[in-house]
Amino acid sequence: MAKNNLLPSGLPRIESMEMRGIVKRFPGVLANDHVDFDVKAGEIHALLGENGAGKSTLMKILYGLYQPNAGEILLNGQPIHIHSPADSIRYGIGMIHQHFMLVDSLTVAENVALGLKSSREPRLDLDRVTTRIRELSKNYGLQVDPDAYVSQLAVGQQQRVEIIKALYRGAALLVLDEPTAVLTPQEVDDLFAILRQMAQDGHALIFISHKLHEILDLTDRVTVLRDGKVIGTRLTAEVTKEDLARMMVGRDILLERVRPPATVGEVRLKLDRVTAVNDDGAPVLRNVSLEVRSSEIVGVAGVSGNGQRQLAEVIAGLWPVTEGRIFLEGREVTNLPPAEMLEAGLSYIPEERMHDGALKEFSVAENLILQDHIREPYSKGIFLDFRHIARHAQEMIRKFDIKTPSQETPLKNLSGGNIQKLILARELARKPRVLIAAQPTRGVDIGATEYIHNQLLQQRAEGLATLLISEDLDEIRALSDRIIVMFGGEIMGIVDNDQTTVEELGLMMAGEKKDLQSLGVAR
Amino acid sequence: MSGELSVLAIIVGIAHSGLRLATPYLYAAIGEMFAQRSGVLNLGVEGIMLMGAYSGFFVTFKTGNLLLGLLAAATVGALMGLAMAFVSVTLQAQQGISGIGLFMFGLGASSLLFKTTLGTVEGVEGFPELRFCLSSLGLNSNYCLSQIPILGEIFLRHNILVYGAFALVPIAWWVLNKTTWGLSIRAVGQNPQAADSLGVSVARVRYVTVTLGGMLAGIAGASLSISLLNIFQENMTNGQGFIAVALVYFGSWAPLGVLAGAMLFSLVNALQLWVQVLGLNIPSDVAVMLPYLLTIITLAFPFRRALQPAALTKPFERGES
């Protein structure tokens, strides 16, 4: 591809971008504290940090979504002011947001054309847009049908549309915010090939991630943020995973989980050909059969939106089963209301913890007794026993290392990691027989993740049967004894964690069914 | 008159009035459709129509100039739409309540103005029916196309505002689906964050659609006071503005759907008028209730909710997602 020195807006193409002394304050939080960051054409620069470290804030400033309280942005050495996304697009900056910025009800071509001048105003020129999309698709291997509606596309394809949108606008600097979170391992490889080619073509790329192996694999330089400050910028070739983890967390961190051998016991949870449908009557779970035994963690892997949420909710009694049966410790519990599922020994850590798992206006102590507040010892008759509730809260805060100013603090003032620890504490305090843990560490800092993982392994040693649903394949691999892969509401295969490979799992995540024999084993 | 002939005459009469009566629905509902497609629910249509009806009538009454009257109605409507846009886009107020506020304002202000400036119900000469006479083409004939049996009688005996209302349907479809502006409107109503991230000004799109919607609602009001009824009286819209809002839902936010809904309702209205004319033994209140009942029934179908613009009634704030 010929290198053009001017952008479509007539401005010079980006050779270097530098952010100097960026400060951004939100009420009560210093999100960016004098951050310096730069990237050059032809380079892939990683921005690494935990949730809340300030990565997204910094990039939103670069894209004109936030205005900084102090600091400056320089393009090719010249200071510029970015007041809105329109400005940043003009300067040649493109952004692939973590939550895709696509309009579902429009076609790919319409999404690309949105906000652009047409060659025959006021009429749309979708035919020309379609031709250009085909060219870009071919040049970068970004396969996508310009006439398809976005709502019909798989997540991986939607991401390609996002990249095409940016390239179409002549983006010379591309920011990718956690682009691999929704992809299968093979799709990640494809994406990396595309990104490397773009860098070779002279694009400057900023790659935001918290997956260390991806950063080591892809990038040229890496800048680590912690608590809004830059901890350091290094050449990727000169650092190790452990170095990066230490910079990110501020202490040594155990990256590998030790999963000691355990002897599995009796079957505690059994699903027998369970089928469920959505409001439109379309199946969201098809013929799902699985077993989870005592002292076993069974991981459910898959790309987001392939029936994992419904699987968790079906077991928790929150989503009706249309066909098939569910057994808890041999007793049929199909379509029992949630309260009776809890009674039967089930605990559930929901995926949307602030929405389904806790009440953010309620205090820590109150959140710790949800579900059990009507029972002894937390209530006597129609009255709550506040002394006992307080004692229970103190015990849980200590035992589960929940960092909170007090037990009366409203939950919303806690960090994501501590809220998740609280939910875990509440669910485990009920001494469950079966635990459904959906995305237990999503958006949780590394320290809390380490703690939650260790708790899950500890409970496994004590006999708990756990169904772990996660989109993070690393988490699944670290904790699971067996792994179930879901695609389109179906089980693609059930494999032994110690005898499978990332490639095999990746193929199943993309919808390739493993031979039926392995499915038979689980029945 | 033989029995057969009068049945035909009645059918022609109903069809003709049906087209006439669809006029205010079409202006108001197409305007409201634009606002809703961009994400703003304007419940104040009824109030804007009343103000449009009053100002159109008053200016025509005082100046004798119908076009000045129409211009006044459109201007007052646009200003009220602008006010709604300011409250719902800039101030990010709850749209349902601010719309009802706008309705109450229009109802009260038009009544007050009526009492202070007119006092009694007066009449004006409204927009004349076009007859498409051959003589207007310079031909030496007295024949008019409106005399063509049935078709001419139904379709070619209306005034310019009626034809304008029907012309608005394909124009609206074209703007919405074939222009860059239409694409921006559709995107802003569905996913304003995405539109904003591509440099589309969500606020500007919404200001324009809501103001345009107000202007069309003003014209809808004028179509009652200086084209269909040629009088002004208090609360003369009698709920038609609210039906227009319902028609947008009924028509699944598409111009053709709105047209179908408007025709259905206006034909029921026309039928009801004829039922009264013919003195049939059906309480006229039942016929008046019918369109409202129809609205409730159609809105209960869940598949319509899937077609609703996802950002409808939601104020936009940059950086939130």
Image: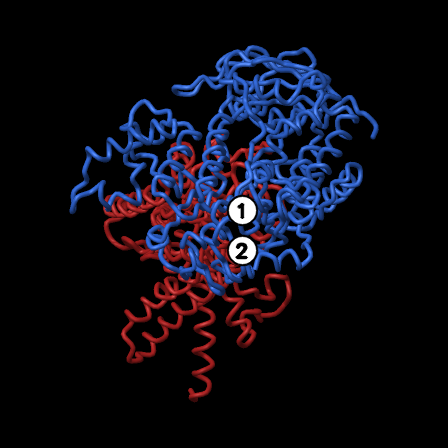
Give coordinates of residue A485: x percent, y percent.
60, 49
Determine whether A179 is above or below B259 in the image.
Answer: above
Q: How crowded is mark 2: few (under 14 residues within 10 Å), some or many (20 or more)?
A: many
Query: Any mark on residue A42, and which?
Result: none
Q: Which amino acid does label 2 sit on?
A: Leu
Q: Residue furthest bottom?
A: B2
Q: Which label's residue is closer to the chain start, 2 or 1?
A: 2
Q: Residue furthest front?
A: A263
Do callouts 2 and 1 mark residues in contact (Cβ within 8 Å)? Answer: yes
Q: Mark 2 lies on which chain?
A: A
The residue located at (44%, 59%) in the rendering is A327
> Chain A's shade in the image?
blue
Q: Which amino acid does label 1 sit on?
A: Val
Give coordinates of residue A491: x percent, y percent.
59, 54
State the residue position of label 1: A298
State the residue position of label 2: A290
> Chain B's shade in the image?
red
Q: Residues within 10 Å of mark 1 (few under 14, many from 20)?
A: many
Q: Is the same chain shared between marks 2 and 1?
A: yes
User: Closer to the camera, B91 or A279?
Assistant: A279
